[in-house]
């Protein structure tokens, strides 16, 4: 059996102890049950995924956040940038 230790806030530790007492189980049994319930609810999905797809997604999300943080320099609307006329048909402007 592997021994795992972790730091918990006083309120979390009290809640876990209360939960264990209510189920008439030891704290270790209760924690084991909670962890098993968590993993069964995630369909066995690991907490850490280091595959190539996940790394690409993380890189893309970082790029999106970087771009979103940039200031807006051009105040033209999307239609103005694309050159659409301001008529009902939305045709390209003749220049």
Image: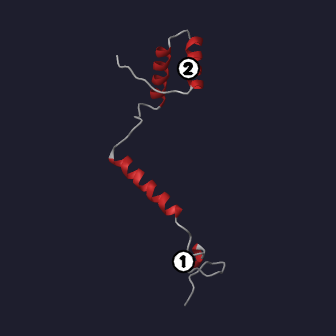
Q: Residue at x 45, y 26 (%)?
A: 6
3D distance between C-alphas at marks 2 and 1: 59 Å
Which image quadrant is residue 15 in? top right
Instruction: Residue 14: give x, y in percent of width and height.
Output: 59, 20
Q: Secondary structure at mark 1?
A: helix
Q: Report the number of numbered marks.
A: 2
How busy is the neighbourhood of tag 2: few (under 14 within 10 Å), some, or many (20 plus)? some
Seen from the viewer's position, the closer of residues 90 and 21 is: 21
Seen from the viewer's position, the closer of residues 80 and 54 is: 54
For label 2, the residue is: 16
The correct choice, above or below, for 51 with respect to 69 in the image is above
Q: Secondary structure at mark 2?
A: helix
Q: Which mark is residue 11?
A: none
Instruction: Residue 47: give x, y in percent of width and height.
Output: 42, 35
How busy is the neighbourhood of tag 1: few (under 14 within 10 Å), some, or many (20 plus)? few
Q: Residue at x 59, y 78 (%)?
A: 80
- Quadrant location of the C terminus in the rendered image: bottom right
For label 1, the residue is: 82
Q: Residue at x 45, y 23 (%)?
A: 36
Instruction: Residue 66: give x, y in percent of width and height.
Output: 48, 60
Residue at the left extreme of this rendering:
52
Residue at the top extreme of this rendering:
24
Mark toward the start of the polypeptide (2 vs 1): 2
Position of 32 with respect to 14 (left or right) is left
Contact flag, marks 2 and 1 (Cβ < 8 Å):
no
Image colouring? secondary structure
Comparing labels 2 and 1, the label whose residue is closer to the camera: 2
Position of 88 with respect to 31 (left or right) is right
Instruction: Residue 51: give x, y in percent of width and height.
Output: 33, 44
Q: Residue at x 52, y 27 (%)?
A: 8
The correct choice, above or below, for 63 with respect to 95 in the image is above
């Amino acid at each position: 059996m592997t021994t795992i230790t972790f730091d918990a806030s006083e309120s979390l530790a009290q809640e876990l102890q209360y939960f264990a007492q209510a189920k008439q189980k030891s704290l270790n049994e209760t924690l084991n049950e909670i962890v098993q319930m968590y993993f069964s609810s995630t369909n066995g999905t690991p907490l850490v995924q280091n595959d190539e797809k996940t790394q690409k997604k993380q890189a893309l999300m970082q790029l999106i956040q970087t771009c979103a943080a940039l200031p807006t320099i051009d105040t033209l609307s999307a239609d103005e940038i694309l050159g659409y006329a301001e008529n009902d048909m939305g045709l390209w402007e003749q220049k």
